[in-house]
Every structure is written in structure tokens, then in C-alpha cells.
Image (cartoon, grey):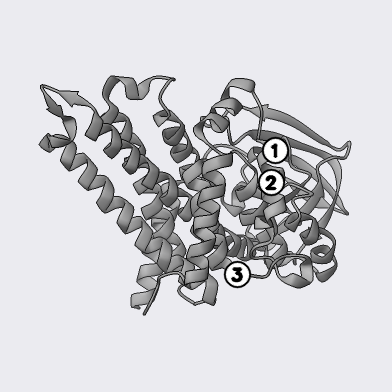
Amino acid sequence: MNFDFSDDQKMLKEQAHKFLSEKCTPKTVRAIYQNGGTYDRALWKQIAELGWAGTAIPEQYGGLGLGYLELCVIAEELGRALAPVPFSSTIYQFAECLLVSGAEEQKQRLLPKVAACEIIGTLARAEGPGAILPKNIRTTFRNGKLNGKKIAVVDGMDADYAVVLARGSDDAGERGLQLVLVDLKQAGVKRRAQDSIDPSRAHAELVFENANAEALGKQGEAWSDLNRVLDRAAILMAFEQVGGADVCLQTAKAYAMERYAFGRPIASFQAIKHKLADMYVGNELARSNAYYGAWALSTGARELPLAAAAARVSATQAFDFSAKENIQTHGGVGFTWEFDCHFYYKRSRELGLALGAQRLWKDKLVTQLEHSNA
């Protein structure tokens, strides 16, 4: 079975790489840190002109209708550049919620605007520390009104719309849950910026006080629909993590080749060789799992939940390890503001929690492996 991308997809990847190498340098990310912005509006506008947001959105909803494989190659380049734009929250999560659960009218109304980057969307799940489980959801949706609070909402300060996980009935389990579509620009929504380890991916607390909202999908199906969305997002985000991990390896290698100690490059020392080799092995394992996930996602294979969990776990571990070893390879200067190493470390930590804690995805991976072997 051939898991490689086609020539056209590789060409798209090269074009995305060239564009982001010119328009999204480390200086772009550094500017967000220094100026206190939430995302790079100029870059977001240019991405809109390229049509990347509509890559996997069907043509009848204003998208390009290319497919998920094309979106995967774009995601890898966005991760490589640490692009400070609300792409993952809008495309991997908000748009996928509409595609999975939305009614035809909702898709026709919002997806063309998503594809054109005219609106920013996000997904609001968490209400407090700890695992996000059905029994922990306290936000309520009654008679078209939404009440409650969500925390750590990615791009919540800039989002125009959010898909919110709420409780539509008194049932404390999955059957009482409802996905809700809410316009965040109304008076019934209050926002408060929250600190994040990665300021280039701004987070917010959203408070809903009798906010007007509409149901997205059927009550009782929200939890299963949400997990389908998270599986898709996990694979796409895995490509971002693989892209970031690759840069960490390349940066560490380049520094080791040019940094001299005791009269020779530090790359010649066995300890550094072991670091680089371990980074390479982890990155390649993550890439192979991401490719498997891309195949499952693009074909709608029944192995999608397994592939998503495998991609999520391996990519998170690879990016985290490579980001830390990149700093260690640079030695004392690796921790300083002047070097770019910390940008990748901070993004690796943020992405590692963006779709839920690592232990939850490990549990899911084990469960899926048990089912596949049953």
C-alpha cells in the first residue's frame, strides 16, 4: 500500500513551504510576542487569497473541494512555520463541526464564509481543569438560550462564532449533551483573555448569559459527533506537530555543525549524535503514523479512530522531545530570548494539550487496539 502523497500534492506542499518561508519567518512570530497581538492579520488575509481555508470544504459550500490529503500537506507547512493564525481552530475544529453535525442551512450559511476566511470560528469544550467528560459539562442550552462558562478557548478573543458543548437536558450522561452554534459578537457573550504558554495562539474565557444560540446536530449525538471531529483534528494537528518537530531537528543539526568546542564541531561528539539520532527516530515514527492517519481520514476508513489516536500520541511525543532536545543541543543560549528555540518548545506544549491531555489519547489508543484485535 502506497501512503505517499501524489506529485500534485507534493507540488502544493512546496508552494506552501515557499510562501510561508517568505511571509512567515521567526520574526513574524516574534512580533506577536512583542506587540501583544493575537494573530497576524496580514498573513491571515494572504492565506485567504490562496484559498487554503477551503481546501477540504466541498465546492457546494464555497470551498475548493480538494480533500484532506491536500489539507494535511498545508498543515505540515503551517506547523513548520509556527504560523500565528487561527487556522486550526477555524478549519480543523469549527468547520469540521459544521460538516459533521450541521444542518444544510447552517452549512450553506457559514461554510462559504469560513472558506473565504471572512469569519473565525472555534470550539469551546473545557469548563475547568481535568478531563473533559460528559458528567463535567455544566453549561446549559434551554429554549434557544445558552448559559455557562468555557475556558481555554483557542482564538476565543477573535472568533466570530463558536461551537459549544452544552447540556440540553437533565440527563447527566452523553444523551443529555448538545452541540450548540453561537454568535460571539452578541451582548450575551463576555470574553476575557487568558494567559497561555504560547502567546501566538491566544486563549480566552467565554461567559454566556442567556446568549442566543442554535442547536447543531441532534441531542444525544453530540458526544459521538464531537469525537469524530476530534479524530479528524488530531490527524491534521499531527501534521503541524511533525512540521514543527522537523524544524527542531534541522535547527539542532545546523547549530551542532557550526558550533565548535575543544577545537571541533560539537556534532562530532557522541552525546550530540545520540540526541540528533533519537530526534530523527521519533520524528519518523510520528510521520509514519501521520501518513497512516491521512490515509484513514481521506478514505473514511473504519480504522480512523485508531489512526487518529496513534498519530496524536506519536506526533505529540515527537514534537515535545525534539523541541526540548533542540534547546539542549544549543546549550545555555538555547534558553535565551534571542534564539528561536523557545518558540517551538512553547508551541509543542500548547499543541500537546489543544485536543485533550495525552493520557486520554493513550487510553483511546489502547482501547482501539483492543477492539481491533478482538
Numbered mark located on residue 154 in the image: none
Q: Position of residue 300 (x, y in %)?
A: 54, 76
The quadrant holding residue 293 is: bottom left
In the figure, 5 relative to 31: above or below?
below
The alpha-carbon separation of the residues under discs 3 and 1 comes to 26 Å
Does residue 163 appear anywhere in the picture?
Answer: yes
Q: Residue at x 36, y 56 (%)?
A: 286
Label 1: which secondary element: helix
In the figure, 21 relative to 286: above or below?
above
Nearer to the camera, 271 or 309: 271
Q: Residue at x 36, y 40 (%)?
A: 248
What residue is shown with label 3?
67
Q: Position of residue 241 (x, y in %)?
A: 44, 48
The three-letter amino acid code for the residue at tag 1 is Ala
Label 3: which secondary element: loop
| Crowding at mark 3 (Cα within 10 Å: few <14, some 14-19, many 20+) | some
What residue is shown with label 2?
46
The three-letter amino acid code for the residue at tag 2 is Gln
The three-letter amino acid code for the residue at tag 3 is Gly
Does residue 237 appear anywhere in the picture?
Answer: no
The alpha-carbon separation of the residues under discs 3 and 2 comes to 21 Å
| Crowding at mark 2 (Cα within 10 Å: few <14, some 14-19, many 20+) | some
Confirm or deny contact between disc 3 and disc 1 (CB under 8 A).
Answer: no
